[in-house]
Structures are given as C-alpha cells and as structure tokens.
C-alpha cells in the first residue's frame, strides 16, 4: 500500500510531524498540567461553592489561545513546533473541559444541581466570550505595524 501511495518517486508520503513537534507538545503538556495543578493548590475550590479556580483557568486559557491563534494566522512564520508546544501542549493541558464536567458532576452529586448547571453555563458562555475577546486582541496585536484593526 505504501508503495502505491508513494507514486512515481518511490518515497513514502509524510505521515507525521516528526519527533521535535511531538516532544514540544509533550513538554508543553507537562508545563500546562503543572501550572494548572499549582494554581489549584494556591486557589483551592471550596466544597459546595462554584469552582472559581477552574473557571478562571479555562477562561484565561480560552483568551490566550484565541489571541495567539489569531496572531499566528496573521503572522504564520512562527515555528510549527513552537505553535504546537504552546497551543495543544501548554494551553491544551492547562484548560480542559473534563474538569468542567467533573466539577459539574461533583456539584450535582453533592445536592447542588442548580449550581452545577450555572457553572456549566458560565464555563461555556464566558469561555466563548473570552475567545472572542482574545480574537479581537489578536487582531490588534497581530496587525502589521502602521495598520489599524
């Protein structure tokens, strides 16, 4: 099959991004996870209360990822391994929807389904608003010098 896909040159098509990109994502993922963990220790969620730390982390991450992605679209010369390390690596592990689902489940099981739904709704709405604000900031920051938004 590989020979058939290779065409006339006899070389196989590129199937991946290489070890540098995979390593960058892994290292970025480790950094993002550790940063999230440390912030969770510094600002622990209180039982029966809205998980403010997780909500803040996800909103901040949504903003930063949208801003960086918009800048990278306007200025695509940033090394791919660096974009992979920061985007899916650091920010992908720093923000996580699974934490939202877990916290919503914990609130619901703890007899606070209304607070769980409020938290879920705030996470989605504020995350989208942060992404929109990040996109706007990225448009301003990524514009070539002398060009307005």
Image: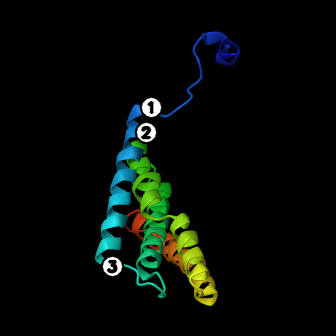
Q: Picture coordinates of residue 137 (x, y %)? A: 44, 73
Q: The residue tagged with tag 1: helix, strand or loop?
A: loop
| Mark 2–mark 1 distance (CA, rounded to whole Å) | 7 Å
Q: Position of residue 44 (x, y in %)?
A: 35, 78
Please indicate, yes or no, whether residue 79 appears anywhere in the rendered image: no
Q: Number of numbered discs present?
A: 3
Mark 3, residue position: 43
Mark 2, Cα crowd under 10 Å, few <14 / some 14-19 / many 20+, is: some
Residue at 61 percent of width and 81 percent of height? 108
Where in the figure is residue 122, as x and y percent of width and height?
A: 57, 83
Residue at numbered disc 1: 18
Crowding at mark 1 (Cα within 10 Å: few <14, some 14-19, many 20+):
few
Are the residues tagged 2 and 1 within 8 Å (C-beta)?
A: yes
Q: Residues within 10 Å of mark 3 (few under 14, many from 20)?
A: few
Residue 111 image offset from top left, x and y in percent: 60, 87
Q: Which mark is residue 22?
A: 2
């Amino acid at each position: 099959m590989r020979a058939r896909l290779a065409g006339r040159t006899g070389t196989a098509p590129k199937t991946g991004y290489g070890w540098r990109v995979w390593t960058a994502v892994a290292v970025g993922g480790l950094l993002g996870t550790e940063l999230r963990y440390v912030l969770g220790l510094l600002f622990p969620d209180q039982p029966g209360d809205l998980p403010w730390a997780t909500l803040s982390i996800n909103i901040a991450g949504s903003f930063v990822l949208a801003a960086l992605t918009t800048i990278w679209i306007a200025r695509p010369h940033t090394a791919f391994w660096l974009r992979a390390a920061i985007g899916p690596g650091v920010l992908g592990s720093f923000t996580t929807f699974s934490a939202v689902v877990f916290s919503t489940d914990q609130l619901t099981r703890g007899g606070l389904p209304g607070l769980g739904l409020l938290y879920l709704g705030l996470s989605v709405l504020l995350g989208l608003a942060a992404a929109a604000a990040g996109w706007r900031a990225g448009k301003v920051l990524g514009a070539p010098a002398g060009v307005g938004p």
